[in-house]
Image (spheres, grey):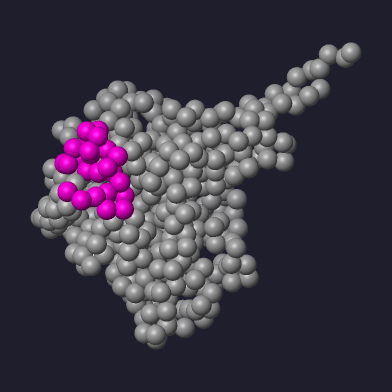
Amino acid sequence: MTQAPHYPQPRTCPYEPPAGYRELGEQGPLLKVTLFDGREAWLVTGYQESREILTHPNLSSQRTHPDFPIVAPRFRSQIARSLAMIAMDPPEHDIYRRFLNPHFSLKQVRRMQPEIERIVSGHVDRIIEHGPPADLVPLLAVPLPSLVICRHLGVPYEDHDFFQDASGKVMLGTEEESGGAAQDLVDYIDRLVTEQIKEPTDGLLGQLVRERVLTGDIGHAELVSIALVLLIAAHETTSSTLALGVITLLEHPEQLALLHEDPERVGTAVEELLRYIATTDLVATRIAKGDIELAGQTIRAGEGVLVSGTLANRDPRTHQRPDELDLLRSDSHHLTFGFGIHQCLGQNLARLELEIAFRELLTRLPGLRLDAPVSELPILGAGTVQRVLSLPVAW
Amino acid sequence: MVSAARVTADRERCISGGRCMATAGEVFDQDEEGIVVVLTPEPPADLHEAVREAAYLCPARAIRFTESTTAVPRP
């Protein structure tokens, strides 16, 4: 008997799936894969099967379970196993989520539009002042989501170098770096929460202190865990999708022309880029807490389950010409933000930041082009958040 | 024959994803808690496709859209 194929695998192109995923997709929609530690887990690669399992009552996010599948050494740490919401099941998950939903609803996010537009416009001013060649990673992709989430939470942006660095290490560092960076972030946020409890300010952390901590709904440690998740989640994903989105558009000039022709297409373009790039390759890591029947097989209680956004988003049974970037397609629905009760809390904020950033960049720098071959751009990440470390452009 | 289409949303299941409001803003809204509100329980035919899409995209499967054709007795 041959060993199940390895998962995750690194990409060679920043926006295309790893070459070995084609075979995983062909063996799908549900197959066994081998993780880095030699253990096996189920991998769901079909779009419909992913929707089905992510809303199945027997799927659990309890990362403290000894058989919970771990996809990289950095996710073995205690902090990674006890994240607010992400590592929780109902009813606890739902209680936390209800506390946060009003602050990330589409309605609330739309109120943030003028401020995000000002932030983006200021950064594009600085890119123009800098002149070509300019690196869009430090000049836009990293600071934009950082500034937006800092303002929203009421966290001092002066400390951004620290969180950007620490969030990056948590998501992509070695086991030791990731654990150390997570602890540094927890210590830092713990001090912020202490200050907020003494004197709550206007941001989300201050509001949660007033609405939830002072009323006894959650404690100090729970607020620290919530803030940690919000900071890390907001930093890596949007930043990476913005940079990879620019590269993808610049590498598909006929598609980019559609956006130049009508900038109002940016909303649907963002959906298609989210589908195509699948920055969050792995949209779910779970464990079955009871048997689950899926695609003619039985996932037994105690077995690990992974859902591949990269493959689900390119399922030929759901998406026509799945490997083609088509900004006008009507079947661009994707699982990049997940599905089910854990679907990304910040999805509407991410979409709005991406729409504003692409629109502003393309309008103000219509001649934007890559200043290095895409094959030479340094990339990092496998199975979680795909990242590009520098993005030199000219115009 | 009369076609009736009815939208309901389960506010207990809602996770405030906002896909419904983004897809069919004439039919769905969110209250200040971020929870779905159905504005138009019997939407006109030109909105049916958007409502079907909204129901499909709802991550919490909280939206139900029933389309039925009933015979109306002649007077």
* Furthest residue toward front: A199
Residue found at x 59% / y 44%: B25
In depth, the one of A272 and A87 nearer the eye is A87
- Is residue A158 found inside the magenta-colored segment of the image? no
In depth, the one of A390 and A108 nearer the eye is A108
Residue found at x 51% / y 68%: A359
Residue found at x 45% / y 40%: B32
Q: Tell me which corner region of the image, top left, top right, bottom left or bottom right, holds residue B74.
A: top right
Judge from the rendering whether residue B45 lies leftward or rightward of residue A320; answer left or right.
right
In depth, the one of A170 and A4 nearer the eye is A170
Q: Tell me which corner region of the image, top left, top right, bottom left or bottom right, holds residue A244.
A: bottom left
Judge from the rendering whether residue A3 lies leftward or rightward of residue A355; answer left or right.
left
Is A366 situated above or below A156?
below
Look at the image and tell me in which quarter the N terminus of chain A lies.
Answer: top left
Q: Which residues are magenta?
A: A198-223
- Is residue A220 found inside the magenta-colored segment of the image? yes
Q: Position of residue A29 (x, y in %)?
A: 42, 38
Judge from the rendering whether residue A94 lies leftward or rightward of residue A249; answer left or right.
left
* Furthest residue toward right: B75
User: Is residue A233 among what the camera can see?
Assistant: no
Is B1 situated above or below B21?
above
How many labels, in total?
0
